[in-house]
Image (cartoon, rainbow, N blue to C red):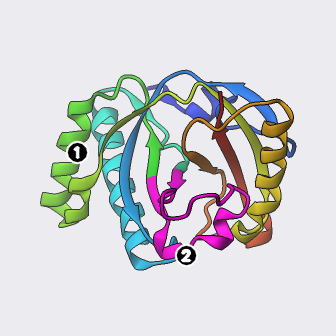
Amino acid sequence: MTKIDLSKTDKTYYTAKQKPELLKLAPMQYLAIAGQGDPSSKGFAECIEALYSVAYTIKFEWKAAGKDFVVPKLEGQWWFDEDKYGGVSMTDAPTKIPRSEWMFRLLIRMPEFVKKESITTAASNVVSKKGLTLARQVEHFEMNEGSVVQILHVGPFDKEPESLGKLQGFIEANGWKRNGLHHEIYLSDFRKTAPEKLKTILREPIK
């Protein structure tokens, strides 16, 4: 049985350089769970647990049907109430917006053959078999970012403003405007990796 690994079949999506670059992305589908609050909080960790529980349930169901795949990297979209915090740039947002006010959508990309119905069924199974009621909030999500600028950030999350500043300068120098939510791909497992070794792709949709 061939095991699909999106990080190998779609290397462009999971690769970035330590300098800003422009990329064009096709529409894709994900598992998603949304929330608000500090990413170091218990609630955030519980969202990750629910998301991965559904992802692995889907994986094993499809493996039994003859189509196995590697569960992809965790991703996230981040935003805040821009009416309340108007004028805060993407470079300043990580330090000037209280972490309790951060809103997020955690994502795990799914292969094309995984259907929306599979996600709904898997979420119900996780609730009934594991008692993770938060899995009810895991849903099918489609994203079409189109043109994005990206950069590979190496180091702790609290140093991200340095990389975001490079992205913002790149956007402004080319006369573009932001056109969507801030997007991160966590190439490293931040629960097990030393902060200085973390690798995170930072993306900003533009127009």
Up/down of 3 relative to 184, above or below: above
Q: Name the mark on residue 98.
A: 2
Element marked by disc 1: helix
The residue depicted at 66 percent of the width and 42 percent of the height is: 203
Callout 2: 10 Å neighbours few (<14), some, many (20+)?
few
Residue 160 left/right relative to 118: right
Marks 1 and 2, the one that precedes in the sequence? 2
The residue closer to the viewer here, 200 or 78, is 78
Where is residue 148 drawn, in percent x and y?
67, 32
The residue closer to the viewer here, 82 or 204, is 82
Q: Amino acid at mark 2?
A: Pro
Image quadrant holding the N terminus, namely top left
The residue closer to the viewer here, 10 or 65, is 10
Where is residue 206 drawn, in percent x and y?
65, 32
The residue closer to the viewer here, 42 or 99, is 99
The residue depicted at 55 percent of the width and 64 percent of the height is: 85
Q: Which residues are magenta?
A: 76-105
Q: Name the mark on residue 201.
A: none
| Residue 179 picture quarter | top right
The residue depicted at 49 percent of the width and 23 percent of the height is: 27
Residue 156 left/right relative to 69: right
Residue 133 left/right relative to 146: left
Look at mark 1 in the image and give the residue it sits on. Answer: 122
Up/down of 196 relative to 19, above or below: below
Mark 1 or mark 2, whichever is nearer to me: 2
Q: How far is mark 1 from mark 2, CA to CA? A: 34 Å
